[in-house]
Image (cartoon, rainbow, N blue to C red):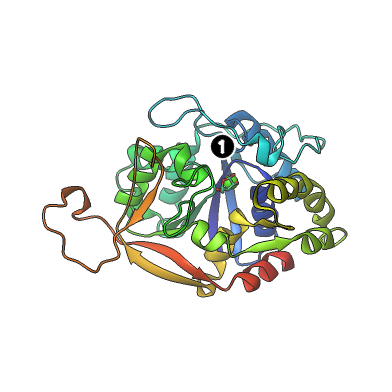
Amino acid sequence: PIKLIIDTDPGVDDSMAILAAFNSPEVEIVGLTSIYGNVPTSMATRNAITLCALAGRVDVPVVEGSHKSLRGAAKERIADFVHGSDGFGNTNPQLAEGEPAPGSAAEFIVQQASKHPGEVVVLALAALTNVALALHLDPTLPEKLNRVVVLGGAFQVNGNVNPAAEANIFGDPDAANVVFSKLPNCWVVGLDVTHQCLMTTEQINGMAGRGAHGTFLRDITQFYLDYHRGVYGMEAVYMHDATALAAVVRPDLFEWHAGAVLVVADGPAKGRTIRDEGKKRWVGANEWQGLPAVKVALGVRGSEVVEWVLDR
Ligand code: BDR
Ligand code: CA
């Protein structure tokens, strides 16, 4: 199985991805690392511990990540209006009591990649700060990691924080630039495809009683569904993070386009992801020279991805 570290800010769609991963024989979760975004980092840690307990997997370490973006700014935007102030759609479930494992998320990523060279996949479901810090800690990390699969970005569509930016990239655009410019094997799943992976109200409610965690997921998703009703006027939710899990296990369901990617770091387009389409040999575009080709998902068989996730 694929050795997987899930870097996460649970979060309703993170919870779907994590519980689906625990039910996927193709992956072995070696640990969860926490990061701010939908909730502050300490709450992300507690929620990740709770999800492990729910899955009956208290043996899986949860390691706490950064509380701040690379620039050191305290998190500007917590998405409680999307995920509830508890990250679980305001259902306030009983939280598990276990302790996080010692050390930092970045140290854990480096340790695991060094212990299993070429085998570890990082599934990054929130701001990329922890992954960027790991790359600072160990410059040889790119050769040791199997790949990083990022849920983030908006290439040919509007963002979701504002017309430019998707939330995870917006959370730490500098970290995203570190990741996209240093990793030779980076796969990016953004809104271009997650906005084609819709879980309908009927499918959400149909999860109840299905499998061990269906009812929990049905319950926590109601607040997230209300947000989608109000903001997008639809009877469905975008299944962002679980789509990225599907990309780890079933990359064949996606259409991948390789090209250098950089992120706008400031101004009104802060967090915008831009991909070089590779149609031109640039002259004098210095920041864009020598960058690795990031694999960006621009097409997806959306209903098959949703069925795959529901199955898990
Ligand atoms: C991403 O932002 C977070 O709110 C979600 O969990 C997902 O990872 C979508 O933009
Ligand atoms: Ca997330």
| Residue furthest to the right | 209
Q: Residue at x 49, y 70 (%)?
A: 299
Q: Residue at x 42, y 69 (%)?
A: 256
Quarter-of-image position of residue 310: bottom right
Who is closer to the viewer here, 292 or 90?
Answer: 90
Is residue 247 placed above or below 229 in the rendered structure?
below
Quarter-of-image position of residue 243: bottom right
Residue 133 in the image, given as x and y percentages of width and height: 39, 37
Q: Residue at x 39, y 44 (%)?
A: 176
Left or right, residue 128 beside residue 5: left
Residue 19 in the image, given as x and y percentages of width and height: 70, 54
Secondary structure state at the residue bearing disc 1: loop
Left or right, residue 197 beside residue 51: left
| Residue furthest to the left | 284
Quarter-of-image position of residue 83: top right
Left or right, residue 224 beside residue 288: right
Name the image quarter holding the N terminus.
Answer: bottom right
Q: Residue at x 75, y 51 (%)?
A: 55
Who is closer to the viewer here, 126 or 281?
Answer: 281
**Residue type (three-letter) at the residue carrying disc 1:** Gly
Residue 255 in the image, given as x and y percentages of width and height: 46, 72
Left or right, residue 26 beside residue 267: right
Is residue 296 placed above or below 43 in the rendered structure?
below
Name the image quarter holding the C terminus.
Answer: bottom right
Please name the residue that numbered disc 1 is placed on: 37
Residue 276 in the image, given as x and y percentages of width and height: 29, 60
Q: Is mark 1 within 8 Å of ligand 1?
A: yes
Circle 1 packing at 10 Å, graded few (<14), some (14-19), many (20+), is many
